[in-house]
Image (cartoon, coloured by chain):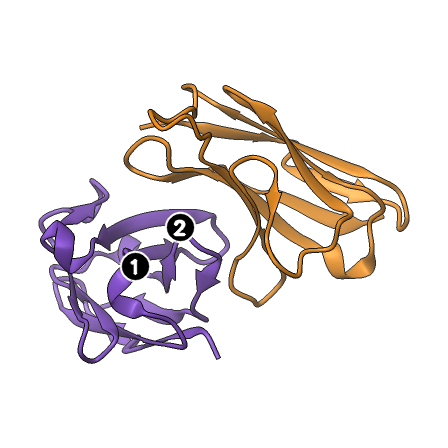
Amino acid sequence: EVQLVESGGDLAQPGGSLRLSCGASGFIFSDHWMDWVRQAPGKGLEWVGHIKKKSEGYATQYAASVRGRFTISRDDLKNSVYLQMNSLKIEDAAVYYCADLGTALWGQGTLVRVSP
Amino acid sequence: DVVMTQSPVSLPVILGQPASISCRSSQSLIYSDGNTYLSWFQQRPGQSPRRLISKVSSRDSGVPDRFSGSGSGTDFTLKIGRVEAEDVGVYYCMQFAHWPPTFGQGTKLEIE
C-alpha cells in the first residue's frame, strides 16, 4: 500500500525543538521530492518546505516563516524524511503533514503544540 | 509570493444541486514547460487533504467524475456536478508554478 506515516508530534515550549519523521512505503521513495505542509488549528494550509532527490543534491527550500529555524533531511535507505524544528514559536503550533505535492500522496499528519 | 484568492469562503448547497468554486491567482500559473500547475484539494472534517484535480483539469484516480476543473492563466474553477453528502468539507486550490507553492484560503462547502 502506498502511504506516508508521520510521527514525532508533541508538546514543546517556545524556544524548544522537535523532530518530526515521515516514513514512506509502497513507492520508490528516492525518486520523489518530499514536502512538509502545516495547518494551524482551524486555519488553512501552509507549505513549509521540501527536499529534492539525490540527483538534485538533496536541495532544500523553505517558507520564509521557518527559514533558518527548520531543517528538512531525508534518508533514502530508510525511506524517511525528517523535519527538525528549532526555536519553536507559538505560531508554529499546527498539524504537520508530509506530502508529495507532485502526486496525490499525503500523510495523516502529526500534531505539534507549542505552549509555555 | 503568488496570492491565491478563492470565492466564496462559505458555500451552502442543496443536496443534488451543482456547486462552483472560483480561484484566482495574482500571477499567471503557466510554467515554462507549458503546463499550468494548479491543483484542487478536498479536506473532509478530521481528514488529511486529498488531491482531486491537477494541472487545472486532470482528475486523480478514484475521484468521481462529478468533479471537474477548468480555467487558464489566472482564473480557475472547480465544479461539482451534483453535490452529495460526502462532499462536505473545505476545498483548496494550490499553485506550484512559482516558488513557494501557495494555497487559497479555502472554501467551506456545507449542505443547506
Q: Residue B81 or A43: which is nearer the viewer?
A: B81
Kindly identify the amino acid type of the residue bearing the numbered disc 1. His
Q: Residue at x 18, y 46 (%)?
A: A61
Asked if labels 2 and 1 share a chain, the reply is yes
Above-or-below relation of A70 to B105: below
What's the chain of the residue with tag 1?
A
Residue wearing tag 2: A102
Instruction: Tell me where residue B7 appears, x and y as whole percent.
Output: 63, 30
Residue A70 visible in the snapshot: no
Residue A53 visible in the snapshot: yes
Q: Which residue is drawn at 31% across and 28% down?
A: B1
Above-or-below relation of B62 to A62: below
Instruction: Tell me where residue B12 appears, x and y as whole percent.
Output: 79, 43
Q: Which residue is drawn at 41% across and 77% down?
A: A26
Residue A79 is left or right of residue A55, and the answer is: right
Which mark identifies residue A93?
none
Secondary structure category for the residue under label 1: loop
Instruction: Tell me where residue B90 appears, x and y as whole percent.
Output: 61, 50
Q: Residue A11 or A79: which is nearer the viewer?
A: A79
Whether pointer 2 and pointer 1 mark residues with C-beta atoms closer than 8 Å, the reply is yes
Residue wearing tag 1: A32
Kindly identify the amino acid type of the residue bearing the numbered disc 2. Gly
Q: Which residue is drawn at 45% across and 74% down?
A: A2
Question: Chain A is which colour?
Answer: purple
Above-or-below relation of B37 to A111: above
- The Cα–Cα distance between marks 2 and 1, rounded to whole angstroms, is 8 Å
Give the mark nearer the N terminus: 2 vs 1.
1
Secondary structure category for the residue under label 2: loop
Q: The orange chain is which one?
A: B
Q: Residue B86 or B12: which is nearer the viewer?
A: B86
